[in-house]
Amino acid sequence: MKKILSVLLVLAMVCAGTAALADAPYTPGTYTVSVDGHNGEICLVVEMTADAIASIKVLSHSETTGLGDVAMDKVIAAIVAANNADVDAVASATVSSNAVIKGVKIALERAAKGEVDQPEEKAPAAQEMTFADQCKEAGVDFIYEDPNAAIYDFATTDASVDVNTSASGKAKYVDETDGPCIRTPLDLAARSAVKVKVYYWIADENGASTIADAAKLDNAQYVSYPFPNDGGKYSVKLQSNGLGTNTVVTVNENNEPTVAIFGLKYTVDENGTDVYTSCAVMAETATYRNLLAGSPIMISYYEYNPYSEKKIGIGARNAGARVKCELDAERSTLTTVPAEGEKAQTLTVAEYLAMDEAARAAITIKYIKMVAKVVELYSIG
């Protein structure tokens, strides 16, 4: 009797296990979905277990920095917490957040049908011959040196962070937690001052016409581009570019954002700890009006592939910092449009704001030199 009961118990457990598997709503795996956002396509990848949403990542997007991307993060956190896509959109960015919700629902439908992403078979990438390769083929002694090696040795000013830097597309720098090395305003000032050096060949009648002679030129050790080797004469040219740029977001009295891109300059104050950022903003622009109205200044500093003309923005292939700044009315100055025969005048923003309406109307402003203090690095990445 006991033996029969044992057999029945085992059968019951097997049946229960089979039923549980049959009831599993999803096929585990990865599901990549693209949907239309506010400013363009949003690409998501949803990782599923048999009965839950394991993770949601945004692979690429063009949504407004500091608004759309923040809304997407909030919606994703809510979806993962609820384990379904029946969540509310973020009021300040309904199009962006609704797009994420729609994308996740599509992924869930695919997961229910077992339509897992299939790995793509990629053809081997063609190897472009470098100058070092050419020298090797020609039997010429040559050792390439990376002119930007020091860029990837960036260390944060936070002594508690054990930094092990690396690069992705010659642009991304990370620490052991796969996060950017910018941890403090001083890190930001140091990183934004970095220049990327790119050496390449340029036609020059006084240059070299053979690979052997080209390898002897000054700075040839820094050239990775293949030598044209077409009988013409070439020398080595240096181009130096900043490693990053900045997206600045201000808002008007209706809390509507204005996004502008500036090559901001970050400087460390005399006290050695405070960091200020500055740039010129033309008068009568939305950013100019927002600054004078006291709008908060939110900046995203991001880096890009210095070997490409395309600045691909914040995302998986870039690194940077998000910064909150406050306009320094005493350091910020306004430059006037001079009347005929007169010189332009400069006054501080504090002086301008202290004027009455009639005095302001009597002058025409050409631009503002914005000087803002960095008050918080509120997120990184």
Image: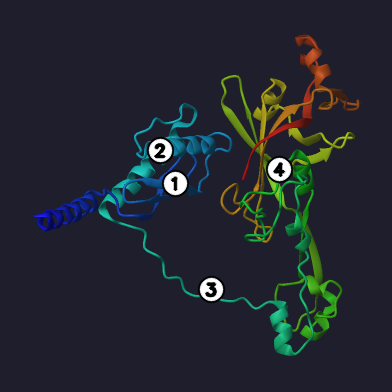
Q: Which residue does the image show at 56% across and 20% down from the upper left?
A: 254
Tell me the kind of residue under disc 2.
Ile
- Work out whether residue 230 can be spotted: no
Q: Which residue is mark 2?
A: 79
Quarter of the picture holding the N terminus? bottom left
Q: Which residue does the image show at 48% across and 47% down from the upper left?
A: 58
Q: Which residue is mark 3?
A: 125
- Work out whether residue 78 can be spotted: yes
Q: Residues within 10 Å of mark 3 (few under 14, many from 20)?
A: few
Q: Which residue does the image show at 81% across and 19% down from the upper left?
A: 350
Quarter of the picture holding the C terminus? top right
Viewer-nearest of labels 3 and 4? 4
Instruction: Identify the element where label 3 is drawn.
Output: loop
Q: Are marks 3 and 4 in contact (CB under 8 Å)?
A: no
Q: Residues within 10 Å of mark 1 (few under 14, many from 20)?
A: many
Q: How far apart, in angstroms, are the residues tagged by discs 2 and 4?
A: 29 Å
Q: Which residue is mark 4?
A: 183
Tell me the kind of residue under disc 1.
Ile
Tell me the kind of residue under disc 3.
Ala
Q: Going from the N terminus, do you reach mark 4 or mark 1 first? A: 1
Residue 98: x percent and y percent?
40, 36
Q: Are marks 2 and 1 in contact (CB under 8 Å)?
A: yes
Q: Are marks 2 and 3 in contact (CB under 8 Å)?
A: no
Q: How far apart, in angstroms, are the residues tagged by discs 4 and 1?
A: 25 Å
Q: Residues within 10 Å of mark 2 (few under 14, many from 20)?
A: many
Q: Are marks 2 and 4 in contact (CB under 8 Å)?
A: no
Q: Which mark is residue 56?
A: 1
